[in-house]
């Protein structure tokens, strides 16, 4: 693990400890059943108090990544479900893969108490703080996609501090928040005046809408709607004996 930074506020240090352990688990360095370092070992590694370590371990246990056993320590839980290995595309990588310069434009970023519509999108019963982000992704001079995203700040409190000025929300989430389940809903639509303006296409143009929700255990992480100009995108399903892995490619 990284060397501790004495100047790091304890809240940020707790989140860092959690992320470090998550990465070791998700990368397979710590396999299911592996006993992670004891609290005292983590305290010495990061130069922090037991409360800071305990907060990180409690968050990991709540997410289902580790199991805490009294007097025995903390252990890596069972593997993530098979859906966790299904690719969730990175829009920046998509653009760069076709040799285009990527640019992000954040249209709006609002932290707020969830509306009824927000709760329906996140599939939750109780109000909570959410982060709503609208942005456009460019491939060269052309709009590649328009993004309408909700992030559940109960599950991802660190997102409240991220401006997403340079790194797309999806890219940041992929790198910082492990997930165990995802659902995609794909549909075609004709752009209304508002969507046409955001995508830089004519009103009524055919567009592709990909709605995606991700969870960690039973807790929602994010719900996003991605809109693409229909003539610039295609869907591909790659099959294997174990199941199909949907892929999307710029046309």
Image: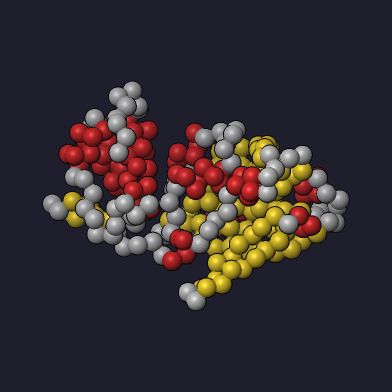
To which quarter of the image does residue 191 belong? bottom right
Q: Residue furthest left?
A: 71
Viewer-proximal residue, 109 or 231? 231
Report whether 107 appears left or right of 74: right
Q: Residue at x 55, y 67 (%)?
A: 245
**Residue 198 screen position, x and y as percent:** 76, 44
Viewer-proximal residue, 126 or 181? 181
Which quadrant, please, contains the N terminus?
A: top left
Report whether 159 appears left or right of 117: left
Report whether 28 appears left or right of 40: right
- Is residue 67 in view from this perspective? no
**Residue 26 screen position, x and y as percent:** 38, 53
Which quadrant, please, contains the C terminus?
A: bottom right
- Examine the rendered structure and indicate whether residue 37 appears above or below residue 69: above
**Residue 32 screen position, x and y as percent:** 28, 60
Viewer-proximal residue, 9 or 116? 9
Q: Residue at x 56, y 33 (%)?
A: 163
- Examine the rendered structure and indicate whether residue 145 appears above or below residue 158: below
Report whether 109 appears left or right of 23: right
- Is residue 245 in view from this perspective? yes
Q: Residue at x 72, y 47 (%)?
A: 144
Q: What is the number of callouts on the image?
A: 0
Q: Residue at x 60, y 33 (%)?
A: 165
Q: How is the model colour-coded?
A: secondary structure
Q: Residue furthest top?
A: 7
Q: Residue furthest bottom?
A: 241
């Amino acid at each position: 693990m990284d060397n501790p930074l004495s100047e790091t506020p304890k809240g940020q240090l707790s989140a860092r400890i959690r992320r470090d352990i998550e990465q070791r688990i998700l990368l397979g360095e710590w396999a299911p059943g592996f006993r992670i370092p004891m609290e005292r070992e983590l305290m010495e590694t990061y130069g922090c108090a037991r409360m800071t370590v305990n907060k990180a371990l409690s968050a990991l246990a709540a997410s289902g990544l580790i199991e805490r056993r009294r007097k025995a320590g903390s252990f890596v839980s069972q593997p993530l479900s098979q859906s966790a290995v299904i690719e969730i595309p990175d829009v920046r990588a998509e653009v760069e893969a076709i040799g285009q310069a990527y640019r992000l434009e954040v249209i709006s970023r609002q932290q707020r108490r969830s509306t009824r519509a927000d709760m329906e999108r996140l599939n939750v019963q109780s109000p909570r703080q959410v982060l709503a982000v609208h942005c456009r992704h460019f491939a060269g001079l052309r709009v590649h996609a328009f993004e309408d995203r909700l992030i559940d700040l109960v599950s991802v409190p660190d997102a409240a501090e991220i401006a997403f000025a340079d790194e797309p929300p999806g890219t940041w989430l992929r790198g910082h928040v492990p997930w165990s389940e995802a659902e995609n809903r794909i549909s075609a639509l004709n752009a209304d005046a508002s969507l046409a303006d955001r995508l830089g296409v004519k009103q009524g143009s055919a567009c592709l809408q990909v709605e995606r929700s991700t969870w960690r255990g039973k807790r929602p992480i994010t719900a996003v709607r991605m809109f693409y100009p229909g003539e610039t995108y295609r869907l591909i399903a790659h099959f294997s004996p174990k199941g199909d892995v949907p892929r999307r490619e710029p046309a």
